[in-house]
Amino acid sequence: MPSSTLRCRALPWGKNKPSLVTDSPPSFCHPRTGRLCVKSDKSRRPTMAMYDTGRRQSIGPAAADDDTVRDIEKSGGEDHHDDDKAAILEPQLGVGGHGRTQRRLRDYQVTMIGFCSGIGTGLFIGAGSAYAKAGPAGLLLAYIVVGAILWCVMQSIGELATLVRVQLRARADPPCCQIPTAGSFPHWATRFVDPAVGFSLAISYGYCYTISIGAEASAAAILVSYWTDITPAVVITVSLFLILACNLLSVRWYGETEVVGGSVKVLCFVGLVFVSIVITAGGGPNHEAIGFRYWNHPGAFVEYNGVGGSTGHFLGFLAAFVNASFSFIGVETVVISAAESINPHKAIPNAARRVTWRIGLFYVLGALLISLIVDPREQGLVSDTGNANSSPWVIAIRQAGINILPSIVNACILVSAWSAGNSYCWVGSRIIVAMTTDRQLPQFFGRTTKHGVPYVAVITAWLFGPLAYLSLGSGGAADAFQWLLSLSTVAGLIAWATLCFCYIRFHRAMRVQGVSRDTLPWKAPFQPYTAWFGFIGSTIITLVAGFSVFLAGNWSTADFVASYIGIPLFIVPIVAWKLYHKTKFVRAHDIDLWSGRLHESEYIPDKPKATTFKGRVRDWFS
């Protein structure tokens, strides 16, 4: 710190709202810790930047003269994270911050990330196995229920991502603020629940995505095998190299790759919709009209594992319910882009609202079309080839006598798999950045290039990718890789439940502290009931994820451990962190609703609403 420093002494303010004090020498009451901070040399009007946890105060001679404060995001050439013991304004552990990433994601990039993130092999291939277990109505109902849970999760975290726009009372009014932070999810758990929960969420959520990098690289190798017998190791190597290269570029280029990948996914799905309608109506080369044939025979539901009657139908739905949740995981990652979005207070709420259209268009409509075009008893659905041969779409296209489309669909799925792996590396690296800003990892991991790329975090996350080579082995190595993948999906479900609970705590704190939600830049509908539904639904999916091992004759110790080990692995870090750091559950009246991240000067004014159809379409994607 420069020679001119801040001296802090405790000033309890209890449940009262904090206020700024501008006596001489200038002082202010920190809104979370209740500490009165006094500048030691020259009078200076306190600003909201003084509250910004995760930003260091620059109070040298120049700062004292011109009231400027260094913004970590905009000082990319300096290393603010070398010294783990460097003094910071916020004395508490786990305060969060931006890190030194830069805001370079434009609105249309955030829109495409939100609209297309998570869409990959789960929708194009994985839905087939769920369909075989549940039948037409079971698949459709499962996707509707899980889609409703995801919608609740997205509404909750969408509001948190643009969190607080509250005016503090002061003689000199400071700017309004919001709280979109780098790798936001662990910060929210730290601030609204308990720092120990934030630490555990960072570990489990980071693991969920870093291990999935290898899964998508392995999937790419399987997809390429549809055309050629090239060695899978070559495809995995090329995929991992491209993922690393893309993530080491400025985040703007990551956004562009997601736009391209998302466009391919959307065009592929739209094409499949039209093809499915044509096949159902009998417009294919075989001229066989299908209609709702498979809803009548074998029926709306199918038996599960030989269990007949309503019990078998329910178990089939339950299996599809769990399978569908795995397909949805990844949709929430758009919120992590808040810290690197040029205009997060607009882009993130828009992405949260549009998830309704995405769920309805991609998942619910997709499930309905699958139930029309292919028989759930088709053996190819459970062949487990991993490429287009297992896709219900491709199976229906082949049965209709269309020969050219399967290769095109396989190519689109390949792009989707690589795009998903690229996204997982980006998410994993930002979670690592979050852990450095929360002082949960050495500050070395938070280092960035002059373009704001956290290169150490990117490389660290990417190093989990080579685990994909385990899938090339046989026996123990391949089984271990599948076990790791199962563990990662459970971690994603636990994250959903935790994020909804973060919102529940935030909503409670707003009520206890007398802060109206009308002060927020965006309010999610039906809160807090929406968050409660998402929390309970995510918890139920987590608990029933491995239900099949409890059926007669189906017990498997390996499957049981893979399905449920994620729960104790989430609890153990919480207990360890609490024992070591003596943290406590944050009471509602003590929750920090005031420390901010964005300043009014960083807001981009909204453009006037378009009045023409062309303009409205353009605004929807911007």
Image (cartoon, rainbow, N blue to C red):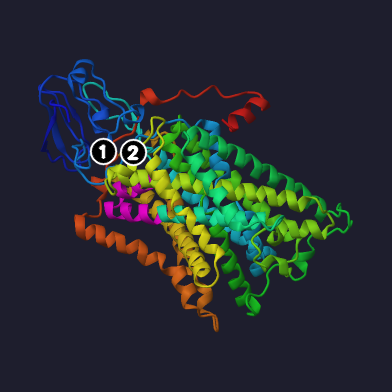
Q: Give the Cα separation between the discs numbered 2 and 1.
A: 8 Å
Q: In the rendered structure, are the residues bearing label 2 and label 1 in contact, judged by CB atoms less than 8 Å apart?
A: yes
Q: Which residue has dot 1 on it?
A: 82
What is the span of residues highlighted in magenta in the rendered image?
184-205
Q: Which residue has dot 2 on it?
A: 447
Q: Position of residue 574 (x, y in %)?
A: 29, 59
Q: Residue at x 13, y 25 (%)?
A: 4
Which image quadrant is residue 218 in? bottom right
Q: Position of residue 418 (x, y in %)?
A: 58, 48
Does residue 122 appear in this view? no
Q: Is residue 564 left or right of residue 18?
A: right
Q: Position of residue 462 (x, y in %)?
A: 45, 49
Which image quadrant is residue 370 in? bottom right
In the rendered view, would you say 532 is above or below 171?
below
Which image quadrant is residue 303 in? bottom right
Q: Is residue 231 left or right of residue 439?
A: right
Q: Tag 1's secondary structure?
A: loop
Does residue 559 appear in this view? yes
Q: Amino acid at mark 1?
A: Asp
